[in-house]
Each structure stands twice: as C-alpha cells, then as structure tokens.
Image: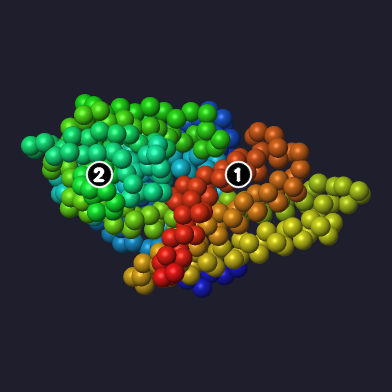
Amino acid sequence: MKNPFDTEERIAFRETMRRYVEKELKPYANEWDEAGDFPWRIHEEVGALGFFGFGVSEKYGGLGFDDAFMRAQAGIEFAQCGANGIVAGVSGRSISIGILQKLGSEEIKDKVLTEVVSGRKGSSLAITEPSGGSDVANLKTTAVRDGDDYVLNGSKTFITGAVKGDYFVVGARTGGPGIGGISLFFLEKGTPGFTVTAMEKKMGWWCSDQGNLYFDNCRIPAKHLMGVENKGFLAIMNNFNNERLGLAAQALGMMKVCLDESVAYAKERETFGKPLLQHQVIRHKIADMSAQVDSIEAYINQVCWLMNEGETPVAEICKLKFTASKALEYCASEAMQIWGGAAYMRGNLIERIYREVKIVSIGGGSEEIMRDLAVRQMGL
C-alpha cells in the first residue's frame, strides 16, 4: 500500500535499512539468537547507517535533524531481521541518546556522544527498579549531595545494554517523594561502588544483554547531574515518546513477517489434497492479519505526522503502543496456527517472534499503564 507521507529521502533510508537487514542480519539471526550474543561490529555498522543519529547534532556524528517517519521506518525494517534480541541489543542505547543530547553538559557530550552515535561505545538508560518499572514517580534509588559529589545507593533491573555498556544515564531520587524529587545523572562503567550483573534465562531477547545495576555508596561528581536537580521526571516522560513509537514500529515489523511467512507457507503446505491457502478458514486468517498490518501502519503514519508537526501526542502514542502490541499478539498467534507444529520448533522464525510478543507489550510501559495514561491525557 502506497504511503502518502513518503519522500525520496525516506524511501532511500528505508531501502538502505532493508538491504542491510537482508544481507547482514537475517542469515545469522537464528545462530546469534541461540548463541545468546551477536558481534559488536553490528552496532558500528548500524551506527554508520544513521540509526542512532536522529535529533543529534552533526557535531557529534548525528544526522542534524529528526524525523519521526524515519525513526519508525528504521524500527519496522530492523524488526524483520528474524531475532528481536538483535533489535533490542542494538537499539537499547537510543533511549539514552536523547537525554545525553538535551541535558548533558558540553563536557559529557564531547566525551560520549560521538562514540555512542557511531556505535563504538554502548550507553543505557537506567530507570526501571526491582520495586517497579512504569511507576517512575516512585523511584527508590537515592542520590545524596556530599560536597562536590552525589552519593548513589540503590539498584536497577532489566536495563538493556547494561552488561556491555560503557555509559549510563541513571534516574535517582534527590528530593522528596513523587515526581518533584527525581534527577538524572551521567555514570561511567568502572566507577567505584557501581556493579553490573547479567540477567539470564529470559523468555525472549536471547541475544540482547539485559542487566541488573547496583549502587553501593557510588560517588558521582556533582557536575554529572544532567539538567536541573529534582526536575528529571519530565525529561524521562518525554523520552518515553520515541521509545514507545519505536516499540510500535517493531511490532509492525514483526507483524509483517508473520503475514509474509504465513502466506508463503500456506501456498506450499497441502492438506486434504490442496494448498492451505485454498481453505477458506486460512484465507480469512490471512485477510484478518493483513487488515491488522494495514491498520497499525496507518496509525503509525498518523502519529509520526503529529510528531513532525511539533506536537507531543502522548495519548495517541500510548494508544498506538498498546494497540500495536495487541495486534502483534494476534498476528503471531494466527501465524502459529497456520504453521502448526512446524512453528513450535526452535529455529523457526515464527517461533522466535511468538516468544518476543510479551516484551513488546511490557517494555516501554505496559499495556495497562498505556491505557491509564491515555485516558488521563484525555482529561478523564
């Protein structure tokens, strides 16, 4: 279906991403997923494609502009690589880059941004805690001013890119309870009192590294405060918008794979003397999956247009995110039904997508939180 928002630049970017995914990622997706890791060079190659450069000044190797459509196109194409753990492992840094660009001091940006945007170094955003993920206003990790330092105590969990990461943006409580007492800090790997442990035996995202962070009287120079003390909550919330758009785009990418793989299999597989695709019940499943794909694609285009117009459509982004995750759940389930037992075996593309569904509905804000936030944004 023709995209009315396409431009020559967007088409060229999408096709570049598509060629890269087809040649450099798809052939190795299952191997890397089973191995639980992928080569670091992928970070650098994706960085060279401009994947991390949106909204970042050219001074630091960024694109010098932002475009919601290109952000979404990158997520859609990347998610069709065959193992969403690769997507998570590479793009996890993206949710920290915006804060580094907007709130980092010139010293921090000069030290960090070029290396992160190029893919040579990794960075992570550390917000989620064992006591809660989406409840950002209830952060327990503390940062207490002590002379020229802040002393950090607490822990974080489910932090993407943490094990291999070099730089971290950490949310901590510097003031009283609620949204008014949260600040953001820049932290480097190897800082005394800061340790990281890998999370293992995950349901999905096998080749993406997630970690637990621990802060035990970890001293951070006061100059590594990012932005204004006790004013970090709004920056965290605004940062969620691009993350949630990206997750919706990834959902669409995986939905497209479910549809394409189901059509191809239904053409080849025969039952009762004819191809599956000639059975009405299968044809109806394909029609429903296609309708879901078209609906989410149109929804993403609408939200991207609003974002490019300078709006902050929080309610629409939240509704898009949970609608896309439910649509992915439907398409993955229907693809499993069409493929039958073949898709239940490890190594099958549909099997890999099926076990990634839940993290899309949880990460970046759960479906329940998204619904509640959308209604509150509607003034209800």
Considering the numbered disc 1 on the image, is that residue within a helix, a strand or a loop?
A: helix
Type of amino acid at the residue the image marks with label 1? Ile
Q: Is residue 184 above or below residue 8?
A: above
Type of amino acid at the residue the image marks with label 2? Arg
Pointer 1 local density, CA inside 10 Å: few below 14, some 14–19, many at least 20:
many
Residue lying farthest right?
A: 273
Query: Looking at the image, do the residues carrying marks 1 and 2 touch, with CB atoms under 8 Å apart?
Result: no
Q: Is residue 67 above or below residue 344?
A: below
Which residue was labeled with disc 1? 353
Residue lying farthest front?
A: 177
Q: Residue at x 50, y 54 (%)?
A: 368
Q: Is residue 267 visible?
A: yes
Q: Position of residue 173 (x, y in %)?
A: 25, 44
Pointer 2 local density, CA inside 10 Å: few below 14, some 14–19, many at least 20:
many
Residue 341 lies left or right of residue 244; in this view the side is right
Q: Residue at x 48, y 51 (%)?
A: 366
Number of the label disc, if any, that sits on residue 173: 2
Number of numbered callouts drawn: 2
45 or 76, which lies in front? 76
Task: Identify the mark nearer the N-term, 1 or 2.
Answer: 2
Q: Residue at x 81, y 46 (%)?
A: 269
Quadrant housing the C terminus: bottom left
202 or 376, which lies in front? 376
Separation (CA) of disc 1 from disc 2: 37 Å
Q: Quadrant of residue 163?
A: top left
Considering the numbered disc 2 on the image, is that residue within a helix, a strand or a loop?
A: strand
